[in-house]
Amino acid sequence: MRNLAAPGWLFAFGLLAASPAAVAAQNDTGQPVGQEDNTSYGTTSAEFLLLGAGARGTALGGTFAAIATDISALYYNPAGAALIEKAGLTIGTYDYVAETRYSWGGVAFPFSGGSRTLGFQLGTFGFRDQPVFTEEQPDGTGATYSVNQTFVGITFAQNFSDRFSAGLTAKYVDDRLGTVNGSAFAVDFGTNFHATLNNHPVKFSFVLANLGSNLTYEGTGLQGNVDRDPLPGEDPTPTLPQTANLLTKDFPLPTMFRVGLAYDVIAGDNNRLTVLGDFNQPNNNTPGFAFGSEWMSNRIGGSDFGFAVRGSYSYTGANDLDPVSIDTGLNDEEKLHGLAFGGGLMYGAGNGGFSLGLDYAYKYLGILGPTNFFSFTLGW
């Protein structure tokens, strides 16, 4: 195949190797050699903001931001929303761990001849009616609690040229944990540069997600009675407990910076093979990377049907569980952490008609086990 010239293949292999090399010069803590580890592990709240949107993005891991040009671009890279060809919506549900569930939905409307896009998205995560256990009542108090975490976002994206687009998303986050709740505001900013290399499409993305205010919690769960200590020199006297509101620290959102690169190794009229790489830096962990690929075929046998196959591996910083030689099999489980794969079926009517898509993703979370994401897309 003449279009698969050596420079294209070299670029593809370089793309897959770039992300691991970016974190090679680090010590065992994930920090650059000679520097102290001051990573704020586990200090952020509203972690559900990182659960994704749509099965396609889940199957491709963090690498998806560079080629996100469908409705789920509202979540992964708002700049990609400017490349959406027609109005549409996507809804999806994530069968997450411990019988919890995450759902996401988005709708986008291109306008100004397709050079601009306005979109809206909603994500929810939680569970209901779980029993309450305390130290005094280890068998349960008879009460229950629920968790309901939600975010809503509005996105504006614009093409500034035939090669560059940018987008901005504003979010409101509501976090209800039992009898306490908190809220915050955040923004996502993304860019997408798309050109050709050796006559094959190449895309580069930059995304900064969940940059915003801190979550401050309040509610009846933080109200209680405290005994007043006597002042210096004051005789201790019995007093009634005083009602007080306990104060909590402010928790930042899980801010994420990521850079992605994608290259179409095969770029035919109806068939495409894309390799992707990604480097990311969260504010609550050490750097990570991901690489993946997507094969997509359209107009199978001249029909309006198509299919896609996807797979990826994502490395998460500080993912270093060590069972200390205890033979529990956890080491093998941990090695599989970050693997994801999936596929989809598409139908697209010609002449700008409506389109349908059904996608599935399987993602393995190590000792937490497998998870499944289903999503449905409609375009018009």
Image (cartoon, rainbow, N blue to C red):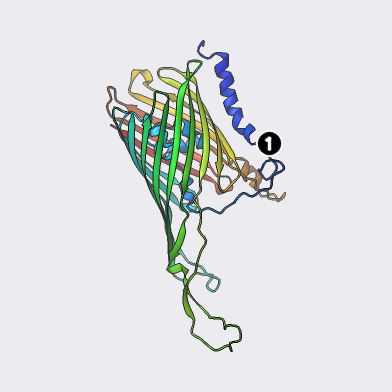
Near-viewer residue (90 or 98): 90
Answer above or below: position of 2 versus 204.
above
Left of 274 or right of it: where is 110?
Answer: left
Q: Residue at x 43, y 20 (%)?
A: 271
Instruction: Using the rendered image of the protein, determine whether residue 205 is visible from the camera's viewpoint.
Output: yes
Q: Going by the picture, which residue comes out furthest to the front?
A: 233
Q: Amino acid at mark 1?
A: Ala
Q: Residue at x 43, y 45 (%)?
A: 187
Which of the 4 image quadrants contains residue 119?
A: top left
Q: Is the C terminus in the top left, top right, bottom left or bottom right quadrant?
A: top left
Left of 172 or right of it: where is 314?
Answer: right
Q: Residues within 10 Å of mark 1 (few under 14, many from 20)?
A: few
Q: Where does residue 157 sit, x and y in percent of width and height?
A: 37, 35
Left of 339 or right of it: where is 218?
Answer: left
Left of 21 or right of it: where is 197?
Answer: left
Q: Where does residue 188 sit, x and y in percent of width and height?
A: 44, 42
Near-viewer residue (174 or 4): 174
Answer above or below: position of 269 versus 354.
above
Q: Where does residue 222 sit, x and y in percent of width and height?
A: 47, 68
Q: How many marks?
A: 1
The local secondary structure at tag 1 comes to: loop
Instruction: Using the rendered image of the protein, determine whether residue 341 is visible from the camera's viewpoint.
Output: no
- In the picture of the structure, the residue carrying the numbered disc 1 is 25
Q: Going by the picture, which residue comes out furthest to the top?
A: 2
Q: Where does residue 11 sit, x and y in percent of width and height?
A: 57, 21
